[in-house]
Image (tube, rainbow, N blue to C red):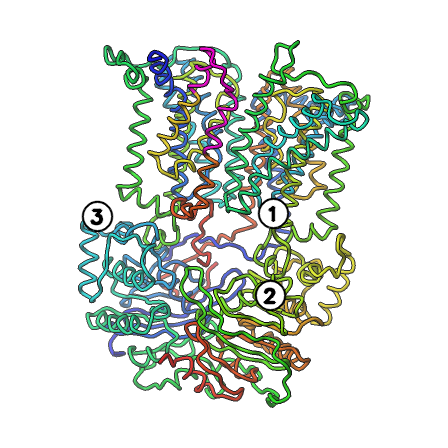
Amino acid sequence: MEQFITSWLGSTPAFAIPLALASMGLVLCERAGVLNMGAEGYMALGAMTAAVLTLTLGNPAIGIAAAVLAGAALALIFGFAVVIMRCEQILAGLATMAVGLGIAGVVGRPYVHKSFEGLQPLDIPLLDQIPLLGRLLFNQDILVYLTVLIGVGLWFLLERTRAGLKIRAVGEDPASADVAGVQVQLQQLMAITASGALCGLAGAYLSVASSSVWVDNMVAGRGWIALALVVFARWDPLKALAGAFLFGAIEALLPRLQAIGVPAPIYLMNMLPYLFTIAVLLIAAWSGTKKGVEPAALGKPYVRQDRH
Amino acid sequence: MSSFRLTLERRQQVSTLRSTTTYILGLLLGLGFGLLVLLSAGAPAATLLDDLVIQVFFSAMGLAQTLTLAVPLILVGLAATSAMRLRFWNVGIEGQLWLGAIGATLVALSDFGSESLRLPTMLLASAIAGAAWIAVPLILKLRAGVNELVVTLLLSNVAYLLLQHLLFGAWKDPVNSFPVSPRFDENEQLASLGFGNLHSGIYVALGITLLMTILVQKSRTGFYVDVIGRNRTTALATGIPVTATITLMILLSGALAGLAGGLIVIGVEHRLTQTIGINTTFSGIVIAFIARFNPLAVLPTAIVLAGIYNAGGTLKVFYGIPDAIVVLIQGMVLLTLLMVQFFSSYRVSLLRQSAQQPGQPST
Amino acid sequence: MSQGSPLLTLSAIDKSFDIHRVLNSVSFELARGEVHALLGENGAGKSTLMNILIGVYSADAGKLELEGKPLKIGKPSDSARQGIGMVHQHFRLVDRLTLTENLLLAADDHPQLKSRAAAREALLNTAKEIGFTLNPDCQVGELSVAEKQRAEICKVLALGARILILDEPTAVLTDSEASSMLAAIRRMAESGRSIILITHKLREVVGFSHRVTIMRRGETVAAGLDTSDLSIEKISSLMMGSSSTSLSPDGIDSKKAPSNVQEHGPDLLAISHLNARRDDGAPALTDVSLRVRAGEILGLAGVGGNGQHELTELLSGIRSASSGSVMIDGADALGLSPRQRRKLGLRVIPADRMASALVSDLSIAANLSLTSVVSGRFGRLWLNRRRMQREAQASIEQHEIAGARPSGRMGLLSGGNAQKVLLAREIDSGMKLLLAHSPTRGLDIRASALVHQRLREAAAKGAACLLVSEDVEEIMALSDRICVISAGKIMGELPGDASAADIGRLILGHE
């Protein structure tokens, strides 16, 4: 039993990290008032870019860095569409998602199913032998630790710094932020680009860290789960991190249960995260706390000369 | 000494000429980008016309395949149209489609009802299952004000898991190593029209397009939809039955998506599989948007998109261009169309701020 | 006050929103250390002018000068850097941040305010200087309106504003809160700051300002008059543009048929003891009782934002009351849907016609036939579109709606013609009670005259008309009886031939 839990917890980050990175990116973006439906696309692009570069150059670090840049670049196109051209955010997000999926599919085609040497777990002797939590805490690759750092850093940025104050103000009330001298468009573009970068990193984790191969449909809806996770986490980066680990733990548990012969309806149990999220939405709507958390200007294009 | 700067203003009145021109230019620009992408992905320019147009629309087998692919696309295009005319974000068309497929399969596998009415029962079951699946976000929105965007999205994932649960469990065909359901009986399959794989579902799609067109353009409900979608306050203040109209149209949206799933399994696959309906939410929204939410225009748009999907298959076989290129082209066309709308919705003006010449009119 | 060079000069400012001209060669001048009242009705252009000064809007033409030097303002932070700050009617504070955080947000150009502690300190010091108390650590969303206002003033002053623009600072305050605010404004001026006070309340102008500028329909009608030379009556006649002054820019026909109060029929609208709340929960209407009889026009005068909006929404059925009763033609209407109220004969011309009566993206024919479609006149299941087009064409000809085709888009019509469409639709054979809220807002003189004529005809045909308007001249020109609303209460009733001064006194008469 102890063995089972140790290895279950140890494998949780592999499922949780992509969700955590993407949903924290989306939290940042939505806190700046931009609804970003493109995560699935940035992640696919990131996963493909990281895999292809790691395959050709043999260096996962370069692959990961390129994935971050690729995600950011695609997000910048989305940002140009919604912040400068004031496009409908949902439709523009879906379109960017398609562009990302499309590029990943087309460019990555020749590299499908070619496995490579990916990112390896850090070797921390002794500590990783601690029962239950040892593998979870001390036998992971560097991105896992980085993700936790990013989560804390993002929380600090949003809640404790003037830069974060500006981002939040733009998402809550762009007209007031504008009057206060905040450059609304710039803040939103930065938040969008950062969210693309984080989603690209999430994609890179999928291909370079957790599977060491690129296949079609590698992201498999994780971008959408990340989007739901933002709502589940009530727009808080730390809660998004925790939520991702919760969802990841469920995802990691099910194949293990099946493997040891527990007759669990894994597909039905996999529904739980989605049903949880819907329940959270419903509870929030009923208790009226939704107004207290969701960025008030989410999804609304800002034009200074509109009559506010 | 004078300085210039740009200011942006929302146009309060947009002429039909301006919006039509920007739309057409955007569509051409988007398709142009699509062509460039195709060429850069390795499609030979010399045979592009043949591959993209002649083979998929003007050869018998190609046209048959295009029309077969068009059947579900027409229905999901109408499903998206029905919801988006009311500004309801149904991004769970795939989920409703899968539920529809499950509904039809349930009737087939359980041999429900009399054999002579089996096919209509299956079609009805798929529509009802699709409508039931969208009823959840609809009720949550109307009763509790929960955002439909996230709920429709989440329920799509739930629907896919349900599909897998059935295909890997109770409905798995024991004689097949793939996760597929047993094959439907002959009387549970739509008649083939002897034209490639094309089945009588095309008549269903055509008939429903016509009905939707009449509903939208001729009926009182269609008029209500026009008002509610554009100005809800006016609709409420003038006594339009807002909730009833929304309920009707959104259930219809789910039913159409469900029917699309039903037609795929009844007409083409003849069994439930886990590969149907992928990306149909996005395609439905793209079709509806390009058709400018006009049901009649959904028909040619869906057929053209089906042709592109069909050509995508050819390009894959002959030139090794992955079919993801079709998704890429759709994304680029949609993004371009969205961006050019800027030029009809906003006015950008160059203001000259001049120190020496007070009161000079701006240019 | 007016000697020496002015601190701030705005000259010949023009501004249009898309095709709507809202400012027409407006000029304004501000001296050091003065309280300068900027007066005008809603829609006169005061807020637009001030938004140009602080860089929210950009002027199409004109010149801004500060201390004789050209003032270039491209965005709100430019004006803040020049020491110009505005306290908006809708406060420019982010609700979900604390007051300190709101100041911190604006501190880009103020290195000394960039730490939380320094910002907090600055707020407390400013508050102390002008005699306010405030809690800098409270979320703005949890403050009362009066607290938010004090908070925003402190924020703007802490950012170093020398010129402070206050947009109707007392409109949202109780009387005692208003008095202390006005005292604070005076203290701020005495400390060398210059104040632009946008207000409707003439008592405040006379009691607290040094000079007055009056705007009307996008133009300056009186620039920088010394307040000491003016009486309330004089200011009110300038502001309302009544025909006794030569400055009046328009000549709406103000004659009306002799009042025939005795001949009026039964009560078609009877409101009694009606109470309602605003969206933010504050009381909007308090114990309102009104009745309107068949064949008469009841004018409801008052400054905007005193419950008129809530009253019209409530009567048309899209807002609910907390208590009281509304009878339309003898039937209890409070529980009825908008559709059922229309069946009783209610017709509505709302203040913002494009937002809540018309659909700008639909055809003119669709807008003209909207309510008939609801009542089923063009068919229950299928619509007879051809008949709709035909009747729309007839309606367009009958009401002389210029430039309109039945299939043309509603949004392409001018304000006056759009109002004609609405009048043509609402004034039909089933009308018994007509509710018209600011029916001439934004219209030119000819269009206004036509609207007035339609209202008179409606009353002459036996309809009961409730005319809610901020335009006292309009009220005087049309009403058989006049009621005045202020702070959600009915202040009193006057006969139709009451003078502007009588009405003005009731509007002002809080006590």
Classed neighbour count for the residue bearing mark 2: other residues with Cα under 10 Å, few (<14), some (14–19), many (≥20): some
Q: Is residue A197 above or below residue C206?
A: above
Kindly report the distance in space between the C-alpha atoms of the residues bearing marks 3 and 2.
Answer: 51 Å
Q: On what subunit does the disc labeled 3 rest?
A: C
Callout 3: SS: helix
Residue C116 marker: 3
- Residue C51: quadrant of the picture: bottom left
Q: Which kind of residue does numbered mark 2 sit on?
A: Ser
Judged left or right of residue B117, residue B345 is left
Disc 1 target residue: B86
Q: Position of residue A266 (x, y in %)?
A: 50, 20
Kindly report the distance in space between the C-alpha atoms of the residues bearing marks 2 and 1.
Answer: 27 Å
Classed neighbour count for the residue bearing mark 3: other residues with Cα under 10 Å, few (<14), some (14–19), many (≥20): some
Q: Is residue C313 above or below residue A170?
A: below
Range of magenta residues: A252-276
Q: Is residue B160 magenta?
A: no
Disc 2 target residue: C414
Residue drawn at (60%, 61%) of the image? C337
- Residue A125: quadrant of the picture: top left
Can residue C25 be seen here? The reply is: no
Q: On what subunit does the disc labeled 2 rest?
A: C
Which mark is in front, 3 or 2?
3
Residues beneath discs 1 and 3 located on the same chain: no
Q: On what subunit does the disc labeled 1 rest?
A: B
Q: Which kind of residue does numbered mark 3 sit on?
A: Arg
Q: Position of residue B174 (x, y in %)?
A: 64, 11
Residue drawn at (61%, 21%) of the image? B275
Q: Are marks 3 and 2 in contact (CB under 8 Å)?
A: no
